[in-house]
Amino acid sequence: MGTGAGSGRGKLFLRSLLFLLLAGPPARHPARGQLRYAVPEELEHGAFVANLGEDLGLDVSTLSARRFRIVSRAGARQHLEVNLENGILFVNERIDREEVCEAGGTCLLHLQLLVESPLELYRVEVEVLDINDHAPTFPWQEYVLEVAESAVLGARFPLESAQDPDVGTNSVHTYRLSPNGFFSLEVQTRSDASKFAELVLERALDREQQRVHRVLLTALDGGVPERSGTAHILVTVLDANDNVPAFDQPSYGVSLPEDAPAGTLVIQLNATDLDEGPNGEIEYSFSGHAPARVRELFHIEPRSGQVLLKGRLDYERASLHELYVQAKDRGPSAVAVHCRVLVHLLDVNDNAPEVTLTSVSTPVLEDAPPGTVIAVISVLDRDSGDNGRVSCEVGPNVPFELRSSFRNYYTLVTTQALDREVVPEYNVSITARDMGSPALLTRSTLTVPVSDVNDNAPRFLQPSYSVYVMENNAPGASICSVSALDPDCQQNAYLSYSIADGHIHGMPVGTYVSINSDSGHMYALRSLDYEQIRSFQIQVQAQDAGFPPLSANVTVHIFVLDQNDNAPVIVSPMPRNGSVATELVPRSARPGYLVGTVSAVDADAGLNSRLSYQLLQATDFTLFSVAPDSGELRTLRSFLEQDASQQQLVVQVRDGGQPALSATVSLLLSVVETMPQTLSDFSEFSLPPEVSSSSPLTLYLLVSLGSISFTFLLAILILTAIRCRGERRSRQGDSCSPPRCHCCPGSRPSSDGLKTSNLTAQPPAGTAASTCLDVPAGGPPGYCYKVCLGPESAQSDFMFLKPCSPPRNNEKDPGKRSWPDQHLQVSKEAKQPNTDWLPPSTQRSALKRYQIQHWGNRGSRWKG
């Protein structure tokens, strides 16, 4: 047993501390851009290793924010850790060098350090230094050595070697034998620098005197403090079997591919013994201290000496296996001889590359510039040589590429601008392929989602909207719906609708329509009236919720459709004082005589305003008729003596809407022998309030007509006054010459001359009165005016003056000329109203009222 086998962890810690004091601080060896440190094994948790923050030149205060960490493979033990507060690398758990590194030689821990923002990768190697924490041990605590009594002096008997897991000076250094009178000890060194002991016979044995000799073999290592292990050797003296087996050579070497199947012959051993019989029969077996791993992998045939493969080899775990084989004959006092078999494994490309995503920064913004690091990828192939050399590449048709930062480390970066609306997510295929034959490859897929940026404005489904709304709609009713799309996602695609500020007929647009900000449904806030507003347009805006927000506008044209909601309004004739409208008809009226015109207006439009007239009731339907289109009331025949002197008529006005609306007017016609100057109900009317309102175009038209008419009348009055003054001067100086026409002889023309209907001269019916206004000498030539009055002009003061040609020089009848002492003569010829120009139906009523206000008086008669 080892002398230090029972020591506690406190003694182990003291020895580690002593080692540190003797070895100095951990070494740091920068090589090829790497840091290298040395640390003894078996340190307690929290032991200082190195100050990485200082050695790497990092700001200690930002280590936590930049996620400074050690990257290790999944399932690997984390022996070392970094303190993010001070950047110190410390021992996280106890490091057993013999457990971490099974093979001898330098024991290194390879660390990959990763820090983000920006992404940086560092490689650190930590060498685990061996301390003398293991004592040498023998395979058995008691070893039996059979020695023939015939053994000669100086005979050597190899002993079982002690094993020490430590390396270097801490391994087995020498052997020591307890004092005795027969044997001495010699320590030998193998080619691999390992030590073994041989027992040398110094004095002849005599079985009859002493059959058993006991000695104590002690194995010492070279560590500080020194450790040791012991084994008891029991030497049994046998009768003479004086020849021992012998191998062809003390050491054998063989090469074997690592993929060799079980049962493969590794080597055929051959040992000879000069004895005969059982003393010459040799048996082969593993030495007592053969590792358990060797016994699992290999098998020795005891009689034939064949070494066969038993288990599965792995070059990456161990490239060399050392087999210690012994040969012993079957005779009494058999002595075992040993040989060493070195099995070198040949690497086979049996390990595919391993791809590890060390750090992934996803999702990536779609406006990320080219060269943005997406992920850090490490690849590892456990094979060696070309079988362990790996190349890495990404699949085609993706905007990414791999850039090599360190050996077997790559960064995945973008190569061009991304567009989430085109490709919202990328599945990047990463292929790692080694250089072996045949080559092995590994494919790994990395999903890279693209994060949305508000780079798309909303877009309406139509460039503009046309909406038709029937008038008299219910307030709050939905009239239409607008819809827009935003190819962005989440918050950037959430749309809200609003109506742009504006005015409609002086009122804010918000008093007419509203819109649901979420759905885009539009609602009428008031009942629309076609007669007040026929169409209007609004601007609807769709705005997303991104930052900064983007918006789009669309024009919505709203057309109000007419509804037959206005009945015709009769504007002529109008009854007086609430009684029935009356009219006088001369008994001498001939068939076709125009009694009057029933006029009506309808505020609707189209077919809803097309009016038709019909005689609904009549005292005698054979006497009167009404024109369906114009509303003219005419006689169908001449009056007879038996016809009633009063005719009761009811005229209905009906529009063309569906359903049709109508209005009626009652007329009382009195048949008289003569036509007095009485007031006619066909001329006096007042427009209803709803008719009086008209569009601005009607108002402009009425103002223009009024201005022209007033200017014309004013010019006539001024010209008449000038002519009358000129005639007065002519009468005072000279007498009127027959060729000239004189106006108003003996009296000053009155301004009422064009307003009264009491004309002094009444020429016969069918004739026209003409007058010629002379101009003083040197002035313009005279003008003749013909006054044409209809048969009902006895009660009308309005006269239509038409220019006529002055008397020609070749006229034969000078008596038809007008002289200054003659009044204007009135023609009795009936003249129909001029229908060459009529304003629109919606403007006609206002024009009629304007004419009544400016041209008529209470004694005029109006005929539509």
Image (cartoon, grey):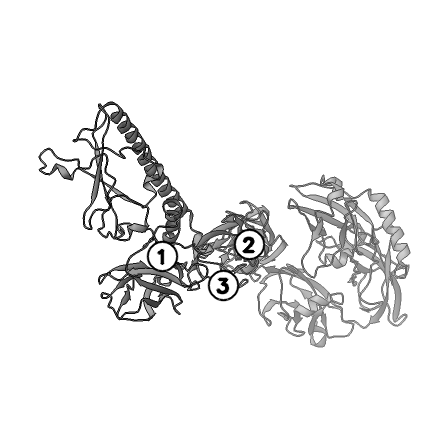
Q: Position of residue 589 (x, y in %)?
A: 24, 60
Distance between the alpha carbons at the discs numbered 2 and 1: 43 Å
Residue 727: image location, x then y, percent? 26, 29
- Residue 844 visible (yes or no): yes
- Above/below status of 178 relative to 617: above
Q: Is residue 577 left or right of residue 201?
A: left
Q: Which residue is pictured at 73% across the width and 44% down the height?
A: 62
The amino acid at mark 1 is Phe
| Residue 682 - label | 1
Circle 3 packing at 10 Å, graded few (<14), some (14-19), many (20+), is: some
* Quadrant for the N terminus in the image: bottom right
- In the rendered structure, find residue 511 and report the number of the disc placed on it: 2
Q: Residue furthest bottom?
A: 277
Q: Is residue 813 above or below residue 2?
A: above
Q: Mark 3–mark 2 contact, CB under 8 Å?
A: no
Q: Residues within 10 Å of mark 1 (few under 14, many from 20)?
A: many
